Image (cartoon, grey):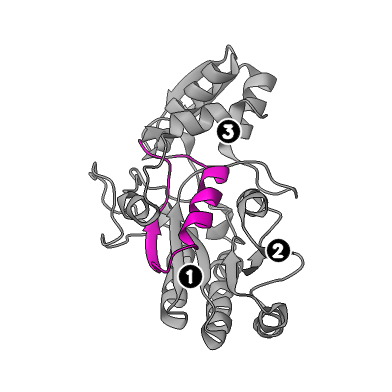
């Protein structure tokens, strides 16, 4: 299998580079701007891929409120152009989406299934949901995976991740305030890369939720990071309102990944187990 990987320098792209089978051609986001329709129409056929994976995205949730055009260019138009190119070649496309496409059900306490109606709260979330729609419309052979709170190592500098930020702030400050009223499931990029490698070996195309199992809040995640790392940090739980972010976040965005488990034939390990393994490597 000849795979074209886009966004190869990010956390997921780096993990995929280590897990994917066969021959691979990799583009960083700088190598290929997927929001450039003409460039995509040239690059994808020229690569002669059997499969395309889009791990590129605009992930600055707060900045998206001011940079809406940039967010939609990367997260909606880019996937559209890739999907159109893949559709014309009859090549499968793997596209990564986000738990943030949910959020309007304030009282929600049961994990979202793929069939649940979306309810994005901000421009980042709306751009990701638009990208899903374009992929579904233009490329019938697609795998769309919604995930949450990715953390891992990246070969190129970028946004970073929550776990690395907590380790840095805990060391620098000794005291950290973290939101404790948003429920989600952080996910190891290495685990997601492995699930993708398993999924593309099938022809079970469609929309999937893909996170480690269980759920937590960002504050409880930070507490587990410090515990596993053996760090004595004064951790202060705060509310979303106290944090005061520019963009709204889902109060509950836990995803039900049972459809993915059925497709690849095994359970997805817990976020605690994945985190503990990751922290042994950093």
Residue 10 belongs to magenta span: no
Q: Nearer the viewer, residue 238 or 40?
A: 40
Question: Quick one: label 3, few (<14), some, or many (20+) residues within 10 Å?
Answer: many
Distance of label 2 from label 3 (alpha carbons)? 23 Å
Give coordinates of residue 19: x percent, y percent. Answer: 62, 51
Residue in the foreground of this view, choosing between 212 and 231: 212
In the rendering, at what x and y percent does residue 177 appear? 51, 25
Q: What stretch of residues is rendered in magenta? A: 186-214
User: Is residue 168 toward the left or the right of residue 148 in the image?
Assistant: right
Quarter residue 151 falls in: top right
User: What mark, if any, has residue 159 been given in the picture?
Assistant: none
Q: Secondary structure at mark 1?
A: helix
Q: 188 above or below 143?
A: above
Q: Which residue is mark 3?
A: 163
Residue annotated with mark 1: 131
Residue name at image x 60 percent, y 27 percent: 279
The image shows residue 14, relative to residue 165, as above or below, that is: below
In the rendered image, is residue 139 in sight?
yes
Query: Residue 163: horizontal and vertical position, in percent?
Result: 58, 33
Residue 81 vertical placement versus 150 (above, below):
below
Q: Secondary structure at mark 3?
A: helix
Q: CA distance from mark 1 to mark 3?
A: 27 Å
Q: Is residue 197 magenta?
A: yes
- 104 on left or right of 148: left
Residue tagged by mark 2? 29
**Number of marks in picture:** 3
Q: Name the spot of residue 109 as percent of width and height, x first.
A: 24, 41
Residue at image position (53%, 56%) is 197
Earlier-in-chain disc, 1 versus 3: 1
Sooner in the amino-acid sequence: mark 2 or mark 3: 2
- Disc 2 crowd rating (10 Å Cα; few below 14, some 14-19, many 20+) is some
SS label for mark 2: loop
């Amino acid at each position: 299998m000849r795979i074209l990987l886009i966004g190869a320098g990010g956390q997921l792209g780096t993990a995929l580079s280590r897990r994917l089978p066969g021959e691979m051609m990799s583009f960083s986001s700088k190598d290929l701007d997927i929001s450039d329709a003409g460039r995509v129409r040239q690059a994808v056929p020229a690569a002669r891929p059997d499969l395309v994976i889009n791990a590129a995205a605009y992930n600055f949730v707060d900045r998206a409120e001011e940079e809406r055009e940039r967010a939609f260019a990367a997260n909606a138009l880019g996937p559209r152009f890739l999907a159109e190119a893949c559709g014309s070649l009859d090549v499968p496309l793997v596209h990564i989406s986000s738990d943030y496409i949910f959020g309007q059900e304030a009282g929600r306490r049961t994990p979202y299934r793929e069939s649940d109606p979306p309810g994005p709260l901000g421009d980042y979330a709306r751009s990701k949901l638009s990208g899903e729609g374009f992929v579904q419309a233009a490329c019938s052979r697609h795998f769309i995976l919604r995930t949450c709170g990715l953390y891992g190592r990246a070969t190129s500098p970028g946004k970073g991740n929550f776990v690395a930020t907590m380790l840095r702030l805990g060391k620098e400050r000794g005291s950290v305030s973290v939101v404790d009223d948003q429920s989600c499931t952080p996910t190891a990029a290495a685990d997601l890369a492995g699930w993708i490698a398993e999924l593309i070996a099938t022809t079970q195309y469609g929309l999937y939720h893909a996170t480690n199992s269980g759920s937590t809040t960002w504050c409880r995640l930070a507490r587990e990071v410090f515990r596993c790392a053996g760090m004595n940090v004064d951790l202060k739980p705060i509310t979303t309102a106290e944090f005061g972010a520019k963009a709204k976040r889902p109060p509950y965005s836990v995803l039900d990944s049972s459809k993915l488990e059925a497709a690849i034939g095994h359970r997805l390990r817990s976020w605690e187990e994945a985190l503990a393994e990751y922290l042994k490597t950093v």
